[in-house]
Image (tube, helix red, strand yellow):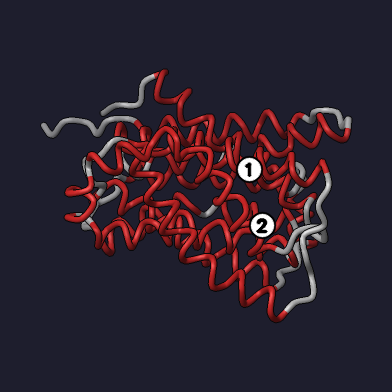
Amino acid sequence: MRLDPGTAALLTLPPLFWAGNAVAARLLVGDVPPVALSLARWVIAFVLLLPFAWRGVIRHRAAFARHWRILLLIGPLGVGAYNTLQYLALQTSTPMATSLIASSSPVFILALGAVLFSERARPAQWLGAALSVSGVVLVMVRGDPANLAQLRFVPGDLIMLVANLTWTLYTWLLRKHRPDLPFAPLLLVQIMIGICAIAPFALLEAALSPARITWSGGVATAMVYMAVFPSLLAYWCWDLGVRRVGAVIPVYFANLTPVFAAVLSMWLLADSPRLYHLAALLLIIGGIHLASRRAAPAK
């Protein structure tokens, strides 16, 4: 389907929620170990979703049994791997570097689609990817290309690169092999499988590291936010968006995350908006427009 205003609005919400997730995760460094944070986030999300979805899981149990292979792939990839790797990356990497790496998502999507799923990308999509990435880079360097020289890569950057790959693969699998099931029970089963994938690593983290959760009102509030908005609501918007317009276009919207992160920083830190924020937003929107245009009919 062609990108319409309603779908565009729908796909704008996940990057907004994910920007808040990155800010919250960064604030919790030192208070909550990264793998424990990932596990706690999804356990809370599971508990919140369970009353609304368990009947659907029982009703469609035969369909879940038929699709167990794909569920064992998308659960660990979308719920387990990506979020855990993101929180691990934020332990050693800077928000600037991780956002810059995450901005390569459109290129990952196009390349992986061509290699694994025989999806040929149009030149306009590659140009849209370049414009979108340029907008994110503009935010990362704060409008001055000279700031690129100040970027330093650490182990967390490599972890974020792997996280990017897992989300790309999750998005393509969701587009190509999504079971024809209602969203809520499907997400509940994904979360359950994801929790099972994260739990052994959380136990290993607890055994190897002396760090423990330092509970406070702020920590609890951040975890509830992460369970409701970046988890349940963002995944619903992403799932619906992928079903409507395919796997490629939503990833361009994901590049709005650093822009929203900058806006949240302005709000939280009372920073003034900059001209380069507007320029970056226009570049990203231009990339989305180019990538979502229909191919010209053959003459």
Q: In which quarter of the image is the C terminus?
A: top left
Relative to 49, 221 lies left or right = right
Relative to 81, 182 lies left or right = left
Describe the element under mark 2 as helix, strand or loop: helix
Residue occupying the point 82% across, 61% down: 30
User: Which residue has dot 2 on it?
Assistant: 37
Residue occupying the point 72% across, 53% down: 96
Kindly check if marks 1 and 2 are in contact, taking CB atoms under 8 A apart as contact. yes
Q: In which quarter of the image is the N terminus?
A: top left
Among the two numbered marks 1 and 2 on one chain, the one whose residue lies closer to the N terminus: 2
Q: Can residue 158 be seen in this view?
A: yes
Describe the element under mark 1 as helix, strand or loop: helix
Q: Is residue 280 above or below residue 62?
A: above
Specify few, some or many for label 1: CA neighbours under 10 Å numbering under 14, 14-19, or 20 or more.
many
Of residues 244 and 105, the one drawn nearer to the viewer in this rendering: 244
Residue 97 location, quadrant:
bottom right
Label 2 sits on what residue type? Answer: Leu
Q: Is residue 228 above or below residue 62?
A: above
Image spot of residue 100 (x, y percent): 63, 54
Residue extending furthest toward the left: 299
Image spot of residue 298 (x, y percent): 13, 34
Residue occupying the point 66% across, 31% down: 279
User: Which residue has dot 1 on it?
Assistant: 226
Residue occupying the point 68% across, 39% down: 20
Specify few, some or many for label 2: CA neighbours under 10 Å numbering under 14, 14-19, or 20 or more.
many
Q: Is residue 135 visible?
A: no
Relative to 174, 6 lies left or right = right
Label 1 sits on what residue type? Answer: Met
